[in-house]
Amino acid sequence: MLTKKKKRWDDIPGCSLEASLNVIGGKWKGVFLFHLLDGTMRFNELSRLARGASPRLIVKQLRELEEDGLVHRKVYAVVPPKVEYSLTEEGRNLYNILHALSEWGKLWVDNHPLERSETISNLIDNT
């Protein structure tokens, strides 16, 4: 039987910022955390936020957030399966950080007009 390797923070080189980014970094983790601030969401709702991401990647990132104690996963024993995700107390502690990052991102996009900024602006306007 395989056992999960427990993360050991003392094995991570660098500063506390590096540890923070190891936990909340990842293409979709910040997006999921930000939207979960509004409340519980189902898998399909979260997957719509991660346009172009494979279900496997979405599950992987949600599981990592769960393992790190930021997200709670509730599975209902029904057919078809129903799974809901919500923030834990520790996850809700990221409220100010996530909102500050969102505001910084809006300013950054406004000050760096590129072809891709139109797409990014549309995504930001929907948050």
Image: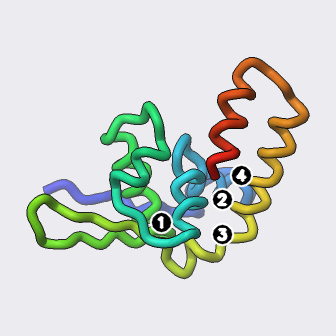
Cα–Cα span, label 4 and label 1: 19 Å
In primary-sequence order, the first of circles 1 and 2 is 2
Relative to residue 37, is residue 120 drawn left or right? right
Q: Amino acid at mark 3?
A: Leu
Query: Dot 1: within a 10 Å radius of its alpha carbon, few (fewer than 14), some, or many (20 or more) residues?
Result: some
> Which tag, 4 or 1, sits closer to the chain's start?
4
Which of the two discs, 3 and 4, sits closer to the camera?
A: 3
Q: Which mark is residue 26?
A: none
Kindly identify the residue that appears in the image at 49 percent across and 77 percent down. Answer: 88
How far is the residue under mark 3 from the one under mark 1?
A: 13 Å
Q: Which mark is residue 94?
A: 3
Q: Which numbered disc flags the more N-terminal residue, 3 or 4?
A: 4
Q: Residue 76 falls in which quadrant of the image?
A: bottom left
C-alpha span from label 2 to label 3: 11 Å
* Dot 4 and dot 2 residues touching (CB under 8 Å): no
Res 79 → quadrant? bottom left
- Along the viewing direction, whichever of 22 and 120 lies nearer the viewer: 120
Task: Name the residue type under label 4.
Answer: Gly
Residue 89 % position (x, y): 54, 81
Q: Which residue is mark 2?
A: 20
The Cα atoms of the two marked residues, 4 and 2, are separated by 11 Å
Q: Which mark is residue 68?
A: 1
Q: Which residue is mark 4?
A: 14
